[in-house]
């Protein structure tokens, strides 16, 4: 069981506890807010430097698979989140409902989508292309979706779009432009540079939850609210897993492609979600908004890890059946 526990989740929970008991105050808030901006810009710069253009082109013409994954990520999820909010508006406090809807607007993960697709013996090249493209496109689509849903409610920063350009897009484009010179170095040092990715998230989480503590977050929430968030996250994940499995089978995708669709279409990224939330929303709201995402992150790792092993057995069974059929001829 412990092998399913994401070590990064332990770091996240530790950071949350530190922020809960030792939040920053006064000038410390400004310091960590500026540090978070720098760390986020560095993270997207390195993502741009590491992103292989070849990987973007691989499987590009498998358009039916990619289109279905994108529709699940950027259409099905938001529709489900908004519908749940409409049907049960009093179930959660407004900040948590915003967090649930916001996570529904996020792109898919990259590393874990590819890793679990590989474990499940699915179509890995297609997963690489779709997950990478999802993250790249998500930098544009997520703010647009969130803006469409939240702007009329006055919950987003007025200059959020400008911040997205300066803090996320420009660093990413700069990394892509410098890729011919630093791309190989970035790939070789992927593990070392991952500390930059994770470190930036931890900084944002500490800054966000320090602000939340100053706003008395835990006094506003009770255990019932947190349990409701867990229930909603689990419901969303299982619903999308079922829908992607059924639709991909009805569309007659091969088993390996169906695995890629289910795994890539049902995941949501914490790595990009936290920085985007920090850019889009006022600092005093970020802590509550990213809470459903942090919970969803661990739930998806547990469930997908178990599902990946089950899918691998299905692929093995299929291959044995095909081999037996060939030998009988």
Image (spheres, grey):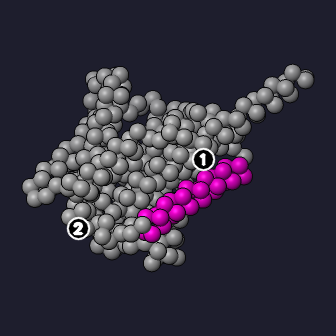
Q: Position of residue 287 (x, y in %)?
A: 30, 60
Magenta segment, which residues? 224-251
Query: Which one is in front, 292 or 131?
Result: 292
Q: Position of residue 220 (x, y in %)?
A: 32, 71
Q: Is residue 72 visible?
A: yes
Q: Is residue 122 visible?
A: no
The label nearer to you, 2 versus 1, is 2
The residue carrying pointer 1 sits among few (fewer than 14), some (14 to 19) or many (20 or more) residues within 10 Å by Cα, namely: many
Q: Give the residue number, with chain letter if any, for mark 2.
A: 215
Is 246 part of what is drawn in magenta? Answer: yes
**What secondary structure is the magenta-colored segment mainly?**
helix
Query: Which one is in front, 206 or 10?
Result: 10
Compared across the picture, whether 29 is left or right of 227 comes to left
In the rendered view, tell whether residue 322 sits above or below residue 202. Answer: above
**Disc 2 or 1, which lies upstream in sequence?**
2
Q: Quadrant of residue 100?
A: bottom left
Q: Give the residue number, with chain letter if any, for mark 1.
A: 262
- Name the quadrant of the N terminus: top right
Which residue is found at the position 56% from the left and 45% from the top? 304
State yes or no: discs 2 and 1 in contact (Cβ < 8 Å).
Answer: no
- Name the quadrant of the C terminus: top right
């Amino acid at each position: 069981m412990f092998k399913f526990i994401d070590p990064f989740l332990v770091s996240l929970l530790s950071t949350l506890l530190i922020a809960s008991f030792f939040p920053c105050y006064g000038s410390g808030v400004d310091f960590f807010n500026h540090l978070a901006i720098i760390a986020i810009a560095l993270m997207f710069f390195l993502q741009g430097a590491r992103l292989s253009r070849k990987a973007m082109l691989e499987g590009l013409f498998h358009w039916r698979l990619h289109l279905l994954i994108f529709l699940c990520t950027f259409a099905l999820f938001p529709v489900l989140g908004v519908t749940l909010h409409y049907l049960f508006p009093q179930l959660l406090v407004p900040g948590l409902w915003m967090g649930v809807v916001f996570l529904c607007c996020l792109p898919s993960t990259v590393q874990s989508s590819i890793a679990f697709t590989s474990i499940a013996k699915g179509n890995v090249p297609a997963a690489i292309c779709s997950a990478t493209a999802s993250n790249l496109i998500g930098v544009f689509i997520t703010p647009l979706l969130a803006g469409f849903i939240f702007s009329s409610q006055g919950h987003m920063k007025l200059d959020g779009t400008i911040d997205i350009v300066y803090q996320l897009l420009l660093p990413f484009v700069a990394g892509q432009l410098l890729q011919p010179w630093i791309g190989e170095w970035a790939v070789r040092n992927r593990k070392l540079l991952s500390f930059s990715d994770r470190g930036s998230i931890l900084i944002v989480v500490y800054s966000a939850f320090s602000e939340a503590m100053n706003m008395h977050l835990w006094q506003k929430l009770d255990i019932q609210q947190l349990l409701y968030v867990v229930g909603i996250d689990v419901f969303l994940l299982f619903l999308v897993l079922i829908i992607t499995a059924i639709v991909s089978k009805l569309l007659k995708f091969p088993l390996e492609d169906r695995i890629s669709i289910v795994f890539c279409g049902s995941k949501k990224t914490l790595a990009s979600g936290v920085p985007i939330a920090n850019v889009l929303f006022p600092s005093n709201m970020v802590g509550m908004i990213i809470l459903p995402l942090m919970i969803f992150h661990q739930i998806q790792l547990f469930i997908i890890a178990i599902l990946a092993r089950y899918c691998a057995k299905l692929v093995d069974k299929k291959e044995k059946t095909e081999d037996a059929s060939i030998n009988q001829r």
